[in-house]
Amino acid sequence: MMRNNSSSLIKKISISLLSGVIGGALSFGGLYYATNGNQENQSTSSATSTTNSGKTTVSNVTYNVTSDVTTAVSKVQDAVVSIINLQSTSTNNQFGDLFGTDDSNGSSNDNTLEAASEGSGVIYKKSGDTAYIVTNNHVVEGQKKLQVVLADGTKVDATLVGTDSYTDLAVLKISSAKVTTVATFGDSSTLKVGEPAIAIGSPLGSQYANSVTQGIVSSLNRQVTSTNDENQEVNINAIQTDAAINPGNSGGPLINIEGQVIGINSSKIASSSTSSSGVSVEGMGFAIPSNDVITIINQLEKNGKITRPALGVSMYDLSSISSEQQEKILKVPDTVTQGVVILSVANGTPAEQAGLKKYDVITKIDGKDITSTTELRAALYAKSIGDTMKITFYRESTEKTVTVNLTVDQSILNQNNSSTKESSGE
């Protein structure tokens, strides 16, 4: 899966979901009248189209369209921005000394930076002299400097407030001097499958800034798991939409028919590797729900980072373990076919203190079935430091339940966890 930010070279960033993901589709045009359940207001003036010479001329009829979509777009469009990720140039500049761009001491300056990629973002808050922008983490990855292009074309420098690789979100701040519009968030928990969804952003970069595409909410609560450039897992409980999302749309808003932001566009499936022929896919884009976005950006504004509780285990999906290994090593009942196998327990962690051991098979968190490491991680990350969590598991043929006190954050993993990619640590 490839995320959909772009660059002067339309840089593609690889992540894993089915196969490759890029954006790809068309801009929304003026044919909104053909969609269901919406209205148009039209006004016309008198028409004249004949001349004495018999020449064909353009009619003087004016056609003024106002619809639910145009109204929704007008509310938020001026809050949508392009984000330019500037990074150090990789080539040696033989004229560096002459033009004052020598970087021999290892430091970089603006003269040695170039646009490595571009994405989108949306201004969601204005506080005094500062305005805040939410975008994707992968839009700003590797940045040495960030610039924001406002809807009117004004370019301003931006400061990175904080990032969260797990949810693929980031917050920037800029001067509010030229900010005229701030977007509002809608309640993503009330979304209905089939309702209109409108994407706004900069497909292929700021050259096509503020492009609008329209579709519907195709599905809700899609578990989208991928890996970013730094080999960190990205996990989104996503809104699926068929609104066209292209490279550069990453970080831009998905809005509802009221002009409220219901999600932040993040990725799109372009082809599926589930078949040998690599089937091409259209109309499968994903956005981070607004309710999840608000939770993350409030923490990023306050702390510059997200602090999540740690369990202190490395683990593996039970479904990925052979039946022979399940029978000889785990010895769980045949009826247990899904869950998470603990491969190791770090010393001094909540898992150890609760009595969890190697080869225990976790099947439920707080009474809810857990089928994979992704679901366990999502349940864990919904908690805060100091919370408790009930874990139901099998130790061989015996089912047990323990209460885990989540007293430490993930920094414990940096000290104690040396697990591999296949045995992800939490």
Image (cartoon, rainbow, N blue to C red):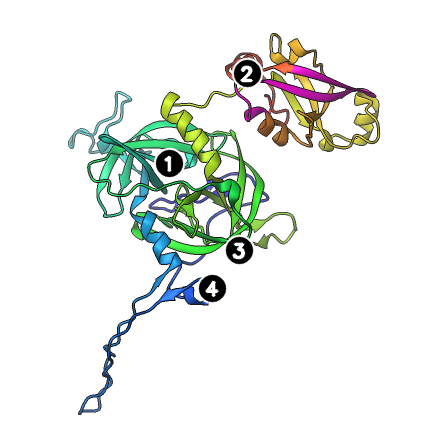
Q: Which mark is residue 282?
A: 3
Q: Residues within 10 Å of mark 1 (few under 14, many from 20)?
A: many
Three-letter residue code for mark 2? Leu
| Mark 2 lies on residue | 413
Three-letter residue code for mark 4? Thr
Q: Residues within 10 Å of mark 2 (few under 14, many from 20)?
A: many
In this picture, residue 342 sits left or right of residue 259: right
Q: Tell me which numbered mark, 1 or 4, is placed earlier along the sequence.
A: 4
Three-letter residue code for mark 3? Glu
| Mark 1 lies on residue | 134
As measured in the structure, the alpha-carbon distance from the residue carrying label 4 to the one carrying label 3 is 19 Å
Circle 3 sits in a helix, a strand or a loop, which is it? loop
Pair 2/1: label in front: 1
Along the viewing direction, whichever of 114 and 149 lies nearer the viewer:
149
Pair 4/3: label in front: 4
Pair 3/1: label in front: 1
Pair 1/4: label in front: 4
Percent x, y of residue 205: 34, 47
Along the viewing direction, whichever of 306 and 72 lies nearer the viewer:
72
Badge 2 vs badge 1, beta-carbon distance below 8 Å = no
The magenta-colored residue range is: 380-403
Circle 2 sits in a helix, a strand or a loop, which is it? helix
Residue at the image position 68 percent from the left and 21 percent from the top:
391
Q: Residues within 10 Å of mark 4 (few under 14, many from 20)?
A: few
As measured in the structure, the alpha-carbon distance from the residue carrying label 2 to the one carrying label 3 is 39 Å
Percent x, y of residue 331: 82, 22
Q: Which mark is residue 35?
A: 4
Three-letter residue code for mark 1? Val
Q: Tell me which numbered mark, 2 or 1, is placed earlier along the sequence.
A: 1
As measured in the structure, the alpha-carbon distance from the residue carrying label 2 to the one carrying label 1 is 28 Å
Percent x, y of residue 288: 48, 39
